[in-house]
Image (cartoon, rainbow, N blue to C red):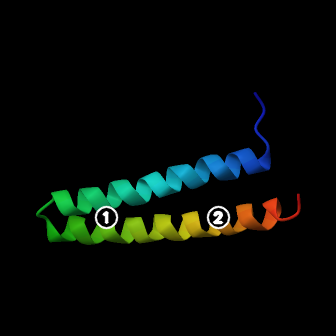
Amino acid sequence: MQMNNMDILKKKLLDAQEMVRDYEMFSKQTDDKEIQKAFKQFAEESGMQASKMQAMIDKYEGFK
């Protein structure tokens, strides 16, 4: 099955949102401060990606 741009954006948005949840959860499960900090940063970066993808989805769905 061929996926169009919107299908891909929506799939990757869900992936990015899941990564945010995973990184946040993992940061709370470790006692290592360096790993906690890295995972919190990864969660923030994934959140920024998700935000940009959501903005693109909103922009292009507005043109339907």
Q: Residues within 10 Å of mark 1 (few under 14, many from 20)?
A: many
Q: Is residue 36 left or right of residue 48?
A: left
For residue 64, side relative to residue 59 (left or right): right
What kind of residue is marked 1? Phe
Quarter where residue 64 is shown: bottom right
Give the image quarter of residue 24.
bottom left
Q: Is residue 33 left or right of residue 52?
A: left
Hey, which quadrant is residue 27 in on the image?
Answer: bottom left
- Name the one closer to the observer, 32 or 14: 14
| Residue 54 numbered mark, or none | 2
Label 1 and label 2: CA atoms lie apart by 22 Å
Residue nearest the viewer, comparing 33 with 18: 18
In the picture, which quadrant includes the N terminus?
Answer: top right
Looking at the image, tell me whether mark 1 or mark 2 is earlier in sequence order. 1
The residue beneath circle 1 is 39
Q: Residue at x 78, y 49 (%)?
A: 5
Q: Residue at (88%, 63%) from the top-left corner?
A: 63
